[in-house]
Image (spheres, rainbow, N blue to C red):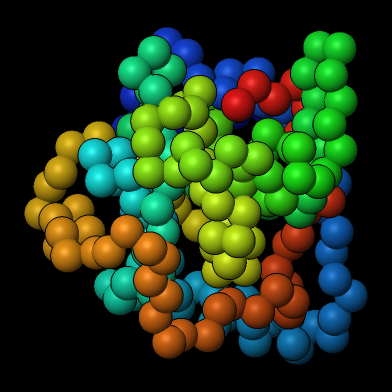
């Protein structure tokens, strides 16, 4: 997946550098008035994902309110996660994992788990895992790993185009969001965004992924 990061992003020397997502966008056939109404509502929402590498946690923030926090695994010292501001470019349910001489279909043995949320940085994304005990540690090849049940929940909350901010250092916002958070997933009482009404969903495979 060769995509340029935002100018604010740093480029580590290694990572999930071989991941390529080939996406075929499926457009839902809905009445024009319904799509227009949903698009207007979507533009009014300011939704970001904030990831603290120091805390090894991820938060979904909408209009300044924290909707959910999750524990994550981040890049190891030899393969650090990138930092900066990124954008979600694709969303993949039950991806197939390809690597030289290896093809792993969706299922319990898939290294990227049950969901892939791709970023506009070469080969990086947020995904599930077949090694849930690694969550909470600096253990990945640079991607952001989550427990499958958590990434499935996160998947329903995010859309293509949402911003992802990965912070390497603790700042005021990180301290405010994660300072008193607990180790387990915390989910606020908020409705997750609907997955229809103009939302673009990708049907994809993850190719040549290293994780």
> Does 100 sit left or right of 36 as displayed?
right
Residue occupying image coordinates x 83% and y 51%: 203
Q: Position of residue 86 (x, y in %)?
A: 44, 42
Q: Position of residue 62 (x, y in %)?
A: 38, 72
Can the viewer see residue 177?
A: no
Image quadrant where one finds the N terminus: top right
Observer-nearest of 37 and 168 = 168
- The percent coordinates of residue 151 (x first, y second) are 58, 56
Which of 37/97 is in front?
A: 97
- Give how far across and how far down residue 109 sits, in percent: 76, 37
The residue lying at 50 percent from left, 73 percent from top is: 43
Q: How many marks?
A: 0
- Residue 175 occupies quadrant: bottom left
Residue furthest out toward the left? 172
Q: Is residue 123 above or below residue 86?
A: above
Q: In the image, is 61 to the left or to the right of 30?
A: left
Q: Nearer the viewer, residue 210 or 199?
A: 210
- Quick check: can you spot residue 72? yes
Examine the image and state in which quarter residue 132 appears. Answer: top right
| Farthest front residue in view | 133
Q: Residue at x 39, y 80 (%)?
A: 188
* Vertical comparison of 84 with 155: above or below: above
Relative to 6, say whether 71 is above or below.
below
The quarter of the rendered structure image containing the C terminus is: top right
Residue at 86 percent of width and 12 percent of height:
101
Q: Is residue 39 left or right of residue 52?
A: right
Q: Looking at the image, is 95 positioned above or below residue 202?
A: above
> 195 or 28: which is nearer to us?
195
């Amino acid at each position: 997946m060769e995509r340029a990061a935002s100018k604010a992003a740093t480029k580590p020397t290694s990572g999930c550098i071989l991941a390529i997502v080939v996406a075929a966008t499926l457009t839902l056939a809905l009445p024009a008035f319904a799509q227009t109404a949903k698009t207007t509502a979507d533009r009014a929402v300011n939704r970001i994902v904030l990831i603290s590498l120091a805390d090894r946690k991820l938060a979904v923030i909408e209009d300044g309110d924290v909707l959910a926090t999750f524990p994550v695994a981040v890049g190891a010292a030899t393969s650090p996660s990138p930092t900066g501001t990124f954008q979600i470019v694709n969303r993949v349910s039950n991806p197939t994992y390809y690597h030289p001489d290896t093809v792993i279909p969706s299922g319990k043995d898939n290294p990227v788990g049950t969901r892939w949320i791709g970023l506009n940085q070469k080969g990086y994304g947020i995904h599930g895992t077949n090694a849930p005990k690694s969550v909470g540690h600096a253990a990945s090849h640079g991607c952001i790993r989550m427990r499958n049940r958590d990434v499935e929940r996160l998947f329903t909350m995010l859309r293509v185009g949402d911003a992802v901010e990965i912070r390497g250092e603790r700042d005021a916002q990180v301290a405010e969001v994660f300072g008193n958070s607990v180790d387990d997933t915390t989910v606020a009482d908020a409705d997750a965004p609907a997955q229809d009404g103009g939302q673009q969903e990708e049907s994809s495979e993850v190719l040549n992924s290293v994780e």
